[in-house]
Image (cartoon, rainbow, N blue to C red):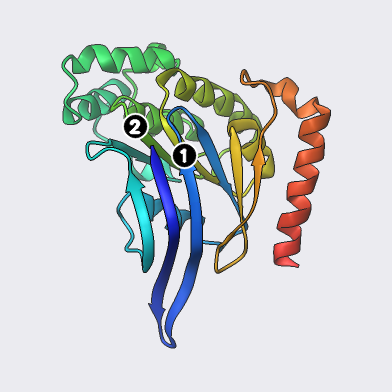
Amino acid sequence: MISVCNLSIAKPNKQGSHQIIERVDFDVMKGEIVAILGPNGSGKSTLLKALAGLQTVTSGQIILLSKDLKIGMVFQNASQSLYPWYSIKKQICMFAKISGCKSPELSAKKMVDLFGLGSMDHLFPYQLSGGLMQLVAMARTMVTKPDLLLLDEPFSSLDYFTTMRLLFKVRNIIKQEKSATIFVTHSPEEALLFADRILLLSKSPGKIVGEVDVKLKSERSQECVLDGYFVEQKQKLLSQLVGFIA
């Protein structure tokens, strides 16, 4: 679906340039969820923006396996990206129309139902909690049927319990839709529960210094946090992240 080959990103500063990402290589296949896990300042969001075509790269390649590959991105703060004058239903329907859906209203209804928003699809953003606004932002992006879905710390502004509830719901929907997904986070717990594979990014300049194939069952639930494998892997990832900032 997408291949990243020897990718480096630098940004100009007073000294000349500052290396953000250095020689990163990875692939993501259709239906796979890959988490990019790293400390603050490791270049996770910059890398994601480069994959979306919103950030210039210094060297290397981003190879999309189709010229018609459709990319969708969900940013950290949904409240800043939703249109305040549109209801939930209209937000999602508008994106369906823009993406060229043959039946935008039917597509929007399907996504509203998938995300469990049916009883409140008439509400406006100011009437929603942070968790619901994040769900709407994801539903709005998913209705476009992206081949590649980019999630930039979508749960970072939510409390723990809301995150756990939404995380499993969104993972199940992505698996149904079979989008290749890249998920940026600084939380080992989120990465393990949400992803099929984890790429560990070092502190700046960000390099891939580890990879974990997550061996939890495909159907994830809150029970996974009690799994011995989950506890062991979380501890290992935490130790590595602490090592980067020590």
Label 1 Cα neighbours within 10 Å, binned few <14 / some 14-19 / many ≥20: some
Residue 127: tell me if it is visible.
no
Residue 81: tell me if it is visible.
yes
Q: Do the residues under discs 2 and 1 have CB atoms within 8 angstroms?
A: no
Question: Which mark lies nearer to you, 2 or 1?
Answer: 1
Q: For residue 106, which quarter of the picture?
A: top left
Query: Which amino acid is tagged 1?
Result: Val
* Disc 2: which residue: 147
Q: Residue 148 or 59: which is nearer the viewer? A: 59
Side of 157 where 236 appears, left or right: right
Instruction: Give residue 61's position: percent from left, percent from top.
Output: 36, 57
Label 2 Cα neighbours within 10 Å, binned few <14 / some 14-19 / many ≥20: many
Query: Which amino acid is tagged 2?
Result: Asp
Q: Residue 99 or 62: which is nearer the viewer? A: 62
| Position of the N terminus by quadrant | top left
| Mark 2 → mark 1, Cα distance in angstroms | 11 Å
Q: Secondary structure at mark 1?
A: strand
| Residue at x 22%, y 36% (from the top left corner) | 68
| Residue at x 62%, y 61% (from the top left corner) | 202
* Disc 1: which residue: 28
